[in-house]
Image (cartoon, rainbow, N blue to C red):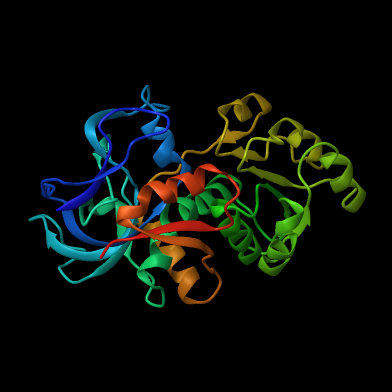
Amino acid sequence: MKAITYSAYGDPVALELTDVDEPKIGPDWVMVAVKATSVNPVDWKLATGGMDGALDTFFPVTPGWDVAGVVEQVGPAVTTLEPGDEVFGYVRKDAVHGGTYAEKVSAPIRTLAKKPVNSSFAEAAAIPLTGLTAFQSLVHSLDIGPSDTILIHGASGGVGSFAVQIAKSLGARVLGTASQANHDYLRDLGAEPFVYGEGLVDRVRSEIPEGVTAVLDLNGGDLAVSPDLLAEGSAGRIVSVIDPVVKEMGGEYVFVTPDVDDLEELAGLFDDGTLTVEIAETFTLADTQKAWELNQQGHTRGKIVITVD
């Protein structure tokens, strides 16, 4: 089968479209015929060796953790999925090797759910990692509700776009930082936009003198001033998905985990119209290098999707 691979750590990384063996299927795994995947910064950060101390890597590596596709085969212990099911998921395994930038991927059933009924495969592939990151941060860690005013650092990116929509669906007032060019986009999502960087605390406090009740950090740039944004009685209600130093502020560092129940919640939010997907650009599998180069620029609004024929 065809897959994108790299044979060593590097920056820039040399990606190749190569022929590889079809993956094996464990007793509680399934084989998915991949229709689409999406690019996340962790994909190319792994390829530079940036997480070598945390995850075992076996070369050649096929990158990618997001997937949307069709179940082709199931392991003998699988009862929740069957061939022909359309699924999506966050296929993070215990080692970095057989990822989703391929015609087929083997996936533990703990990483997959049936895809949203109303979504395209491209839309479904854009949801898992970023959607789960937003959902788990807001629901499980911050317990956001109608009484909250939350500030999201980096609100126009892949995770941020989902975080704004999910926080609004939970009844919260949502503030988001982004470049001026993305302020109308944030307004369309339901957030009150603010320019990031120097003077952020003053800008927020001028609008909300009492401060916000929670902060979600998605880019690290303004994490240091986050405690100064919090209202009295909200100390420690800071989550960062970027920097574990947040724990020194009394907050929580979140590293997204595969979760079937959470994926099903996200599918429901998409199908009822609560959640929309912003796709910045779509590339073919053969053009994955271009997709990575665009993502590495750090200015993408929404998600970059790779389709697999």
Question: Percent from the top left, x then y, of residue 153?
Answer: 68, 45
Question: Percent from the top left, x then y, of residue 232?
Answer: 82, 40
Does 88 sit left or right of 79 as displayed?
A: right
- Front-lying residue, 33 or 204: 33
Q: Where is residue 230, by image quadrant? A: top right
Quarter containing the C terminus: bottom left
> Residue at 55% of width from left, 39% of height from top?
241
Q: Is residue 226 above or below residue 182?
A: above
Regarding residue 75, the answer to whether it shows in the image is: yes
- Front-lying residue, 85 or 11: 11
Does 282 sit left or right of 208 as displayed?
A: left
Task: Spot the residue most to the left.
Answer: 76
Q: Is residue 265 above or below residue 21?
A: below
Question: Percent from the top left, x then y, of residue 242?
Answer: 56, 35
- Front-lying residue, 113 or 32: 32
- What is the count of numbered marks? 0
> Residue at 40% of width from left, 28% of height from top?
51
Regarding residue 147, the answer to whether it shows in the image is: no
> Residue at 29% of width from left, 50% of height from top?
101
- Front-lying residue, 83 or 39: 39
Question: Percent from the top left, x then y, of residue 138?
Answer: 58, 51
Q: Where is residue 37, by image quadrant? A: bottom left
Does 80 sit left or right of 278 as displayed?
A: left
> Residue at 77% of width from left, 33% of height from top?
225
